[in-house]
Amino acid sequence: MLAWSGEVASSRDSTQMTAFEEVGEALLTRVIDDFVERMVGDVMIGFFFRNVDHARLKRREYELAARHLGADVPYSGRPLDVAHAPHPIQGGQFMRRLQLLKKSMDSHGLPERARAILVAETERLRPLVTRDAGSDCDAEGAGRKVSEHFASLRKDKA
């Protein structure tokens, strides 16, 4: 299984700017803040975030994005596969998240280089978020998975 330890490979020499340096902290923060607001308010995936601290989610998303762009920013969240394992995330929902990220990057004029990196890294990390290889949503299957998920949570509390 693909593992993500938070390490990002560097393909630059010491004279070349990182994509993070090109973008800057302020712009990346605006993009991530907008992105998280889009996710939590989205009718297709927002329910995943109803019990999530949005400020914390913004910090984790920023840490990941900054690292992907070459910043020396530590990722302080749980491993992605562990964090997402309990959730019945489908391929279509994963792709919806990617579309919302693209909209946020477009809205704030993120440079193409940074945009390409963030899209590629999102796609690379997909196996850690969902085992569903497709891009469709199966409403019946999703309902069953959500019911099973919440039933297991109730059992854990009992």
Image (tube, rainbow, N blue to C red):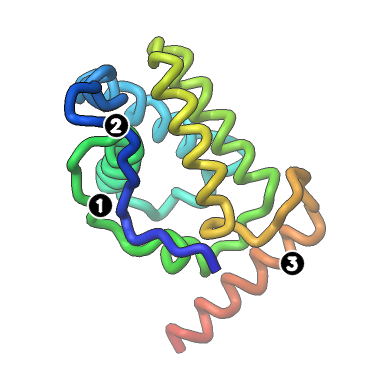
Tell me the SS state at disc 3. helix
Which is more foreground, mark 2 or mark 3? 2
Q: Quadrant of residue 55?
A: top left
The residue most toward the bottom is 158
Quick one: label 1 or label 3, which is nearer the N terminus?
A: 1
- The residue positioned 29% from the left and 31% from the top of the image is 12
Residue corresponding to mark 2: 12
User: Residue 2: x, y in percent?
Assistant: 51, 63
Residue in front for this viewpoint, 72 or 110: 72
User: Residue 41: x, y in percent?
Assistant: 49, 34
Does residue 54 appear anywhere in the picture?
no
Residue in front for this viewpoint, 38 or 13: 13
Amino acid carrying label 3: it is Arg
Q: Which mark is residue 144?
A: 3
User: Residue 18: x, y in percent?
Assistant: 26, 26
Q: Which mark is residue 151?
A: none
Which is more foreground, mark 1 or mark 3? 1
Which is more foreground, mark 1 or mark 2? 2
Residue in front for this viewpoint, 155 or 24: 24
Instruction: Categorize mark 3 by other alpha carbons within 10 Å: few (<14), some (14-19), many (20+).
Output: few
Amino acid carrying label 1: it is Tyr
Instruction: Categorize mark 2 by other alpha carbons within 10 Å: few (<14), some (14-19), many (20+).
Output: few
Amino acid carrying label 2: it is Arg
Distance between the alpha carbons at the discs numbered 2 and 3: 47 Å
Classify 149 as above or below 140. below
Quick one: label 2 or label 3, which is nearer the N terminus?
A: 2
- Residue 16 is left or right of residue 65, and the answer is left
Residue corresponding to mark 1: 75
